[in-house]
């Protein structure tokens, strides 16, 4: 199929769609800007159809799947407004440096505010319970989310000795094989719908390993398998993949999980922090 605007494809194919697919088409046309931030589960629920219907709809338009369709929508919308803007915070060429900084500040603060409003206290407490009693905790993710996983492992390691990051997808599988009941995987995935993540989570479930998932989408495939889901904020379009705002939202969740675990035994936390500070003192000039 030739490279045409995603919304033009919908118009061209509309009268060949099924009644359920037309529900998706109608919703997508009316809510053009919002669609690029939705997961397939959220779009299906909003349209009142099954996820399979959304997938069929995307393929009927000539896309390989929902993600390709969502990217095409984002490109179409960005192309109309600013020639294709991959930057978060709605940054434009006309902005001054001060304007740019203010917009990025606002986007990052908004990500934290969204996270604060979305995160359920009971889920945070449940995550704290699992981590406090865990034998081994492996911190995992893919791409930019793995950077957050490494940050989480580093932060927890300043107090606890059983947190380790595992970066490579093959090594994640190997490490998961050696886990068992009582161990925990702390997984970071903005979409909650990557193949590597699902493979790890399914393997962990078979081994009775508990899963804590930090994600933007609580109705994602990964969230359906996790024991605890911690939702972060920050809307990220497909062409803004890996935005700092999304990572700040996840790191805010990390800070809250860490504080929840530590506040249950502040004396031990303070003792370990002092021991670490003394041990590292020799490394500073």
Image: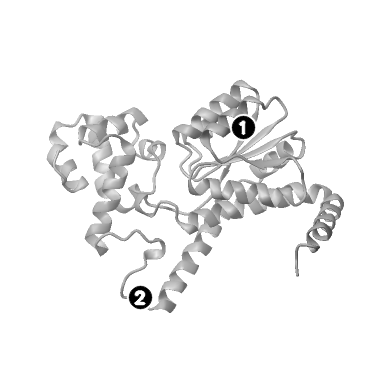
User: Residue at the location (75% across, 66% down)?
Assistant: 284
Q: Quadrant of the C terminus?
A: bottom right
Q: How was this image coloured?
A: one colour
* Picture layout, residue 163 above or below residue 183: below
Identify the secondary structure beneath mark 1.
loop
* Picture layout, residue 173 above or below residue 25: above
Task: Specify the label residue 92 is tagged with.
Answer: none
User: Residue at the location (69% across, 37% down)?
Assistant: 137
* Residue behind mark 2: 95
Q: Where, by quadrant of the figure, is residue 176 drawn?
A: top right
Please indicate, yes or no, whether residue 187 appears anywhere in the rendered image: no
Image location (x, y in percent) of residue 42: 41, 40
Looking at the image, the residue that sits furthest to the top is 206
In the shown orientation, is residue 126 left or right of residue 174? right
Given this view, does label 1 or label 2 mark the residue nearer the observer? 2
Identify the secondary structure beneath mark 2.
loop
In the shown orientation, is residue 194 left or right of residue 77? right
User: Residue at the location (15% across, 43% down)?
Assistant: 11
Please indicate, yes or no, whether residue 106 appears anywhere in the rendered image: yes
Image location (x, y in percent) of residue 117: 56, 53
Comparing 39 with 83, the one in front is: 83
Q: Is disc 2 surrounded by few (<14), some (14 to 19) or many (20+) residues within 10 Å?
A: few
Q: Is disc 1 surrounded by few (<14), some (14 to 19) or many (20+) residues within 10 Å?
A: some
* Picture layout, residue 273 above or below residue 7: below
User: Residue at the location (62% across, 25% down)?
Assistant: 177
* Residue behind mark 1: 227
Image location (x, y in percent) of residue 18: 20, 29
Q: Quadrant of the N terminus?
A: top left
């Amino acid at each position: 199929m030739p490279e045409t605007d995603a919304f033009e494809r919908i118009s061209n194919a509309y009268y060949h769609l099924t009644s359920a697919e037309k529900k998706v088409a109608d919703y997508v046309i009316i809510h053009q800007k919002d669609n690029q931030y939705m997961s397939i589960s959220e779009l299906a629920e909003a349209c009142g159809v099954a996820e399979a219907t959304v997938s069929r709809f995307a393929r009927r338009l000539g896309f390989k799947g929902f993600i390709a369709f969502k990217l095409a929508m984002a490109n179409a919308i960005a192309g109309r407004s600013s020639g294709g803007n991959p930057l978060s915070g709605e940054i434009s060429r006309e902005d001054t440096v001060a304007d740019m900084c203010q917009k990025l500040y606002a986007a990052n603060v908004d990500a934290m505010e969204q996270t604060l409003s979305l995160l359920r206290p009971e889920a945070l407490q449940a995550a704290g319970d699992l981590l406090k009693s865990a034998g081994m905790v492996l911190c995992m993710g893919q791409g930019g989310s793995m950077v957050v996983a490494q940050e989480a492992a580093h932060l927890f390691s300043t107090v606890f000795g059983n947190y380790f990051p595992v970066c490579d997808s093959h090594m994640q599988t190997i490490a998961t094989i050696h886990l068992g009941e009582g161990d925990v995987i702390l997984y970071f995935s903005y979409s909650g719908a990557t193949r590597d993540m699902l493979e790890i989570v399914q393997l962990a479930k078979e081994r009775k390993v508990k899963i804590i998932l930090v994600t933007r989408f609580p109705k994602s495939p990964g969230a359906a398998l996790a024991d605890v889901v911690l939702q972060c904020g920050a809307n990220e379009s497909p062409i803004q993949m890996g935005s700092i705002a999304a990572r700040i939202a996840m790191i805010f969740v990390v800070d809250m999980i860490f504080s929840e675990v530590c506040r249950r035994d502040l004396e031990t936390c303070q003792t370990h922090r002092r021991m670490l500070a003394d041990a590292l003192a020799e490394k500073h000039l």
